[in-house]
Image: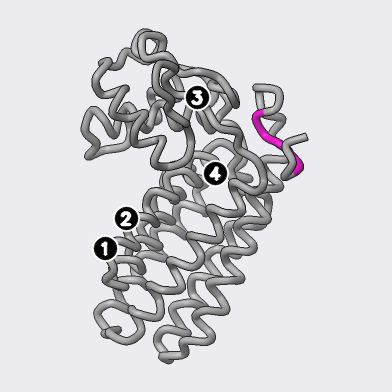
């Protein structure tokens, strides 16, 4: 299996095509996906103002969806909106990504604890059934399906956890990490470990072993964070200063 680490969405046309491929999105979600990916791939650099007219022309988007999308991205922490100045891109550094992973880890720990209390055989079988398509996508090196199937597995756990607010925050963070991950891919050997970690998690849930389930989630998130940071360090981002190797931004 080849490494899923090539650039997938770096130029403007690819960004728009990526966002268009996300089914079930309205015009605001579509605009947010386009702008988010442009930020995460360095097309809009840190400190750069995002002008509505420029984005509309570049990506063939409407002005109103762009304005709403920028408010959504402000909530995600990707831009800052100031009166009479508009939206400015924030700097994405190691601390930004590490903080995202920490929040995602804690939300999934909450979901698993809640899920185990109400676990059924049907739910376990559903989670197990999601592993097969992911394994198949990895074996065939089907990049988009790898991201889609990974998301399905984690969102199923969050759904079974039954906390709607946790799900909302989790999905917001997932969109950001997904954008970065689609850019840099996975390092060699990481994806087989994802499958192994997922199976260990399901086994711990089957045994109603909360401590073991929590431990594998922490291991999974630590490994994922380490892999993503390594990929970002190796990516040679196209905009100078976009990816800061140090938390100080130097």
Determine contact: label 2, label 1, CB under 8 Å.
yes
In this rendering, which labeled residue sits more in front, label 4 or label 1? 1
Determine contact: label 4, label 1, CB under 8 Å.
no
Which numbered dot is residue 88? Answer: 3
Query: Does residue 177 belong to the magenta stretch?
Result: no
Which quadrant: the C terminus?
Answer: top right
Task: Bin the neighbour count of mark 2 within 10 Å (Cα to Cα): few under 14, some 14-19, many 20 and up.
Answer: few
Determine contact: label 4, label 3, CB under 8 Å.
no
Q: How many marks?
A: 4
Disc 2 to disc 4, C-alpha distance: 20 Å
The span shown in magenta is 242-246
Identity of the residue drawn at 49% across and 81% down = 213
Disc 2 to disc 3, C-alpha distance: 24 Å
Indicate whether 62 appears above or below 101: above
Which numbered dot is residue 164? Answer: 1
Which numbered dot is residue 243? Answer: none
Corner quadrant of residue 113: bottom left
Which numbered dot is residue 181? Answer: 4
Q: Position of residue 123 (x, y in %)?
A: 28, 77
Task: Bin the neighbour count of mark 3 within 10 Å (Cα to Cα): few under 14, some 14-19, many 20 and up.
Answer: many
Please tell me whether the stretch drawn in magenta is mainly helix, strand or loop: loop
**Which residue is disc 2 drawn over?**
168
Identity of the residue drawn at 52% across and 79% down = 214
Query: Does residue 244 belong to the magenta stretch?
Result: yes
In this rendering, which labeled residue sits more in front, label 4 or label 3? 3
Q: Nearer the viewer, residue 247 or 40?
A: 247
Image check: 197 left or right of 234?
left
Corner quadrant of residue 30: top left
Q: Earlier in the sequence, mark 4 or mark 3?
A: 3
Disc 1 to disc 3, C-alpha distance: 30 Å
């Amino acid at each position: 299996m080849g490494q899923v680490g090539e650039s997938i969405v770096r130029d403007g046309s690819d960004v728009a095509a990526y966002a268009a491929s996300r089914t079930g999105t309205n015009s605001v979600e579509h605009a947010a996906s386009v702008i988010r990916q442009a930020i995460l791939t360095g097309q809009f650099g840190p400190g750069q103002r995002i002008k509505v007219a420029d984005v509309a022309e570049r990506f063939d988007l409407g002005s109103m969806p762009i304005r709403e999308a920028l408010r959504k991205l402000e909530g995600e922490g990707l831009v800052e909106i100031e009166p009479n100045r508009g939206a400015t891109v924030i700097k994405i550094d190691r601390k930004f990504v590490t903080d995202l992973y920490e929040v995602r880890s804690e939300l999934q720990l909450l979901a698993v604890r809640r899920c185990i209390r109400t676990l059924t055989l049907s739910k376990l079988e559903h989670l197990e059934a999601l592993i097969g398509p992911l394994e198949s996508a990895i074996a065939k090196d089907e990049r988009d399906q790898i991201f889609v199937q990974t998301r399905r597995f984690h969102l199923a756990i969050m759904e079974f956890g039954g906390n709607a607010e946790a799900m909302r925050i989790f999905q917001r963070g997932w969109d950001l990490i997904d954008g970065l991950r689609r850019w840099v891919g996975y390092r060699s050997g990481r994806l087989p470990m994802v499958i192994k970690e997922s199976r260990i998690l399901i086994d711990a849930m089957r045994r109603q072993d909360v401590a073991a389930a929590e431990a594998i989630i922490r291991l999974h998130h630590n490994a994922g964070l380490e892999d993503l940071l390594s990929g970002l360090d190796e990516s040679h981002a196209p905009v100078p200063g976009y990816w800061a190797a140090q938390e100080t931004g130097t």
